[in-house]
Image (tube, rainbow, N blue to C red):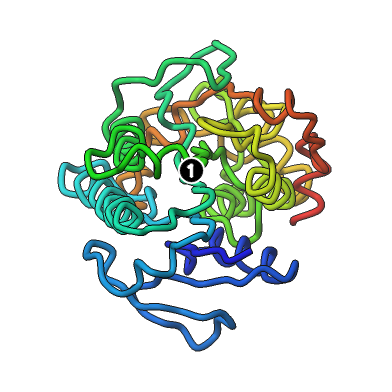
Amino acid sequence: MKIVLAGGGGSLGRRIAADLAGRDHEIVLLTRRARADLPYRQIEWDGATVEDWADELAGAAVINLAGELVDRRPTRANVELLRLSRVRPTYALVEAAAVLSEPPRVWLQASTLAIYGDGGETEIDESAPVADGPPQMAGVARAWEAAASLADAATFQRAIVEDTRQVVLRLGIVLDRGSPALRRLAGLARWGLGGRIGTGRQWVSWIHIHDVLAAVRRTLDDSSLAGVVHLTGPNPVRNAEFMSALREVLHRPALVSPPAPLVRMGAWLLRTDPALALTGRRCIPGRLLDAGFEFEHPDLVPALRDIL
């Protein structure tokens, strides 16, 4: 299968590309700057303008991961940067697909479980309503998904909508050595700051990278999967349990359990958003479980040991 991957230069994109290339799929990366260390065909684009690269989408599978990292302060300028870095490339892909005589076969659209905002104690599956905020999380995610909505795109002909199966992959925290979130949390644990964050009761929805890759392969191949699919493990944990597991695997004590005011101060110094740590969601992968998907790493401590 030919797979066109937008946003393939990030840590997750590189893992997906390598996994699929190792299974004899043809990988084409849409990238703002070609990299000599990536062994795939690369086509430079500006992430906004439909040009000759549009022909690559014909009959292919599209995986759209394009977007800046969310790990930044929640200023108005940063929220707009995060939104535009997702919406513009997505609109360009939709517009490109609309002019093709042969539409993409399948479209995997990345999103985030942060679209549910602070979920509290509710167990959230794919049928749950999305939240109104906070803007850097749910707000950006709503705009991202709306930009990719083939059925709502005015430029899309009905035949193209019907012929392209779209899966919106709402991702949890990906556990991988290259994952920015895991690097940040493991760094805190290594420096003795690995106690619970805030109250520690907020839920963490996580998934091992091997299960991400297997789920991506499954959604590419399984025609019964369309619409929203949670890409998260079956056993979310509270923040206190997550940090305890990190300390256990890294053999570090918890010298500090920062309360919420200290977290907000530290987030300002680290130029990040405190809501990333102080809010949570108890999400389950209902669609994958219903489809019989088996997780290789369903439990947190063994998953962390495998990675760290």
Query: Measuring 30% from the left and 24% from the top, which residue is drawn there?
Result: 133
Above or below, comparing residue 61 to residue 199 in the picture: below
- Compared with residue 35, is residue 127 higher up or lower down, i.e. above or below? above
Per the image, the residue denoted by label 1 is 163
Q: Position of residue 165 (x, y in %)?
A: 52, 41
Res. 264 visible in picture: no
Q: Nearer the viewer, residue 121 or 212?
A: 212
Residue drawn at x 39%, y 50% is 71
State which quarter of the image contains the N terminus: bottom right
Q: Residue furthest top?
A: 122
Q: Position of residue 284 (x, y in %)?
A: 64, 24
Residue at image x 25%, y 53%?
A: 88
Between residues 95 and 66, which one lies in front from this camera angle? 95
Which image quadrant is residue 44 in? bottom left
Residue 123 seen in the current view: yes
Question: Is residue 181 rendered to the left or right of residue 48?
Answer: right
The kind of secondary structure element at disc 1 is helix
Q: Reply above or below: 37 against 128.
A: below
Position of residue 208 measured from the top left corner of the image (x, y, whole percent): 70, 46
* Left or right, residue 2 beside residue 156: right
Residue at the farthest left position: 77
Task: For the C terminus, give its image quadrant.
Answer: bottom right
Q: Is residue 3 above or below residue 160?
A: below
Mark 1, other Cα within 10 Å: few <14 / some 14–19 / many ≥20: some
Residue type at the position of mark 1: Asp
Q: Is residue 82 left or right of residue 296?
A: left
